[in-house]
Amino acid sequence: MNVLARTAGSRGAETAKIIRQKSLSLFARHGFAAVSMRMIADAVGVQPGALYQYHPTKQNILADLMQSHMETLLQAWENETQQGEPPQAALERFARFHIRFHITRPDEVFISYMELRSLENEGFKIIEAQRKRYEGELKAILEAGIAQKTFAIDDAHVGAMAILAMLTGVNTWYRSGGRLSQSKIEDIYAKMVLRSVGCAMEEDNV
Amino acid sequence: MNVLARTAGSRGAETAKIIRQKSLSLFARHGFAAVSMRMIADAVGVQPGALYQYHPTKQNILADLMQSHMETLLQAWENETQQGEPPQAALERFARFHIRFHITRPDEVFISYMELRSLENEGFKIIEAQRKRYEGELKAILEAGIAQKTFAIDDAHVGAMAILAMLTGVNTWYRSGGRLSQSKIEDIYAKMVLRSVGCAMEEDNV
DNA sequence: CAATTAATTAAATGACTGTTCATTTAATTA
DNA sequence: TAATTAAATGAACAGTCATTTAATTAATTG
């Protein structure tokens, strides 16, 4: 009588997970439009029709992947941020967090930034809103810093866009096991970000 | 007897140009894989077969577009750069040039950065090499500035990647006719770039 | 064990894919 | 005007596309 008990013949939770994993890496490698349902089915080890037990359309697979990536990102930042922290410390925290989060999820980041246009109306709007929320977090930090003259930039919006592009760009060149450690890369980017808004890192201790 | 005179029935130069224009905007809007030869033909106002008078394959259209974009970029920078200029001035010149060049060519930039993976071996290698050449120009400026201690960054390669990502990112948000003029945007980015490497702009006159 | 049902298969759907090609159209030259 | 040829047509090719469906398998329940 256990309500939560799975009913007969169920090992689909496992399959669902594999579908997500394989779709993610295929979309990242070839792009959404270039990946067929047959390719996904082959990678999962299942017939194409079986995929439709888990997702109504191919688009829905992409939408799910992007949505849960953005939710994870927003949740992770919510756990990381410190209310009432001064702008300079908050900006450094944001920069380090963004690098750390993105550098460990190259595939998720890649498709979330490249395949937005592959999403139709509904899915697009949701992701767009989530992204705006994340951009808003950085913009708020910049505006606070501008207001109290810690940051010497004219425009919080352009500043936020420039910083986000710089940070997210780490995924275009970083490959794990490279010349530099992840924490060293974090240091380099944090320093550049703080300087870009016109404030040096305390003691330049890197 | 004019050797340069076009031979009979020739108005194909015009068609070739339209094919390039329409392919460019379709690839930029939908992505290479999501655009069919029939879509291109429809946009051009021609039957699908006619496209093969101008390009042997669909891939070749993309390769041509990307290659000529990169050639234009490298040529434009060659005209812009000043030999023997001090690093700080050279970096500001590079930043302003990059913004100016990219902001006026959103479609070309978009496909050149997004569709590299859609290119097969030969075409890929050519574009990759051209891009490396351009990155090398910025890296050389940074290395010169590091050597004479004008720039306070640890790593020229990471610095170049960060700056390029920041600058190129302008195309993710800028739309012509917006709140800010192109020259104002140039100012903002130039200032942020110079500061990011640890050197302020003379007199902050913006 | 029998009944239930989640999970999957295998085949089929019609639309669309990049590309080829024999043929036609039309602009130019001798 | 007649010959030449660039340019474009439009149908056809062999596959692949996302998706649907009926039938089958297999795990769990009472």
Image: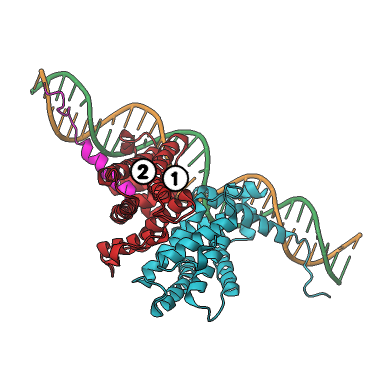
Chain colours: A red, B cyan, C green, D orange
Where is residue A63 drawn, in percent x and y?
38, 40
Mark 2 vs 1: CB contact within 8 A: yes
Residue A205, located in which quarter of the rendered image? bottom left
Where is residue B76 drawn, in percent x and y?
59, 70
Magenta span:
A2-25
Image quarter (top left, top right, bottom left or bottom right) of the N terminus of chain A: top left
Where is residue C15 drawn, in percent x and y?
52, 37
Query: Which residue occupies the extreme front position in the image?
Result: A148
Kind of residue sitting beneath label 1? Leu
The answer to whether residue B105 is visible is: no
Residue B59, numbered circle:
none
Few, some or many residues within 10 Å of mark 1 (<14, 14–19, 20+) = some
* 2 or 1: tag closer to the N-terminus: 2
Residue B105, located in which quarter of the rendered image? bottom right
Q: What residue is drawn where x is 46% and y is 49%?
A: A156
Badge 2 and badge 1 both on one subunit: yes
Query: Which residue occupies the extreme bottom position in the image?
Result: B84
Label 1 sits on a secondary structure element that is: helix
Which residue occupies the foreground of this view, B108 or C21?
A: B108
Chain at tag 1? A
Q: Is residue A14 left or right of residue B61?
A: left
Magenta region includes residue A116: no
Label 2 sits on a secondary structure element that is: helix
Image quarter (top left, top right, bottom left or bottom right) of the C terminus of chain A: bottom left
Q: Is residue C2 left or right of residue B181?
A: left
Q: Which residue is mark 1?
A: A116
In the picture shown, does residue B199 fall above or below A23? below
The answer to whether residue A16 is visible is: yes
Q: Which residue is mark 2?
A: A66
